Amino acid sequence: MPVTLRIALRDWDYMTPLVLGDVSSSRLDIKVDRVGTLVSSLADDIAHDAAEMSFSRYSQMRHDGDDRVIGMPNFIMRGFRHRCIITAKASPIRKLSDLAGKNIGVTGWRDSGNTWTRAALRREGVGVEDAMWYAGRLTEAHPIVDRLDGFGRPGRIEAAPGERPMVDLLLDGGLDAVFTPFMPKGFFDQESPLRQVLDDFRAAEVAYFHEVGYIPGMHLIGFKADIVQEHPWIMDELSELIDESQRIWLEKREKYADTTPWMIDELRRCAADLPPTWRASGLAENEAMIADFAEELYEQKIMPRLLTPADLFPWHAKAR
């Protein structure tokens, strides 16, 4: 009798084979709940046994000694962050170092993606203390919520003035740049008044990869501790299924590349710029990235104690 696993996931394209059942297991009956917003607290959520989680918020649980959730080091959301810094099309800002002394908006202070983006700025000499930061909603369509999350500091890290959307502030000069995980509607239109800060963000990202050896991980999958303790094999089983789903999806994307003009060229360039192991799952395969993220959480004063990869993934560390 297979174990039922109720899991909340966003609509990542490469999860399609898993969601449709093209990838399956005789040991698991996977029930995927497609969500637009991450589950706020998996430990307290009666509807799910596992869920996509923010790496930062999972790290906070481990830091605080909350062991009700066990993380699986399969980073289902990865991404370079250089492309995620936008500005007005007429802005003179063209380099990350140009952001020193500027007003920068973020969609959430301790969000994993924004932590990695600040890490990229730190490599260019722009630390937290070298800019003025505002946390707020990206556009009018986004909700007004507390995006400071307790990390506000008057004169350094504040809420967006009047809760105004940050895109509006960017266009009227109230902000010089904004960190965003997803581009605002209309960003890709020819007449968009916005652009990425870096004209050639791809070159910057390839150089970054060669320096650090990884693509930053933002989201992972967390399991309720009781289901892992009852079925110790369950994380490895799901991780293998996710890896297989990614492999099948990549094959389909290569075959049906005509769905997006020039996708075939993009696939070729990715294969040339990145090793085939760039998306590898597992603790050993991601240890350097995990350690760097823990260091950023500490250096950016998001966490007062420096964690190790073993602190963050004790289940997998013990298994080695």
Image: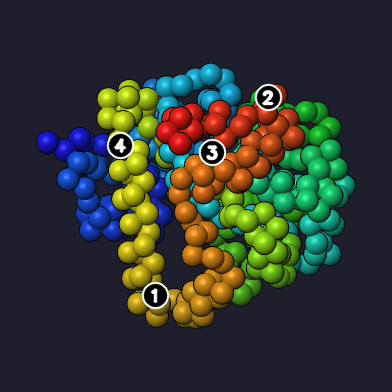
Q: Which residue is mark 4?
A: 234
115 relative to 168, above or below: above
Disc tally is 4
Residues marked 2 and 3 touching at CB (< 8 Å): no
Asked whether 71 or 263 is in front, the reply is 71
Q: Which residue is mark 1?
A: 254
Asked whether 253 or 152 is in front, the reply is 253
Asked whether 93 or 272 is in front, the reply is 272
Q: CA distance from mark 4 to mark 3?
A: 20 Å
Q: Which residue is mark 3?
A: 55
Q: Residues within 10 Å of mark 2 (few under 14, many from 20)?
A: some
* Residue 112 percent across, percent down from the top left: 59, 41
Q: Amino acid at mark 2?
A: Arg
Q: Amino acid at mark 4?
A: Ile
Nearer to us of marks 4 and 3 is 4
Earlier along the polypeptide chain: callout 1 or callout 4?
4
Image quadrant where one finds the C terminus: top left
Q: CA distance from mark 1 to mark 3?
A: 30 Å
Q: Amino acid at mark 3?
A: Phe
* Residue 44 percent across, percent down from the top left: 39, 22
Q: Residues within 10 Å of mark 3 (few under 14, many from 20)?
A: many
Q: CA distance from mark 2 to mark 3?
A: 16 Å
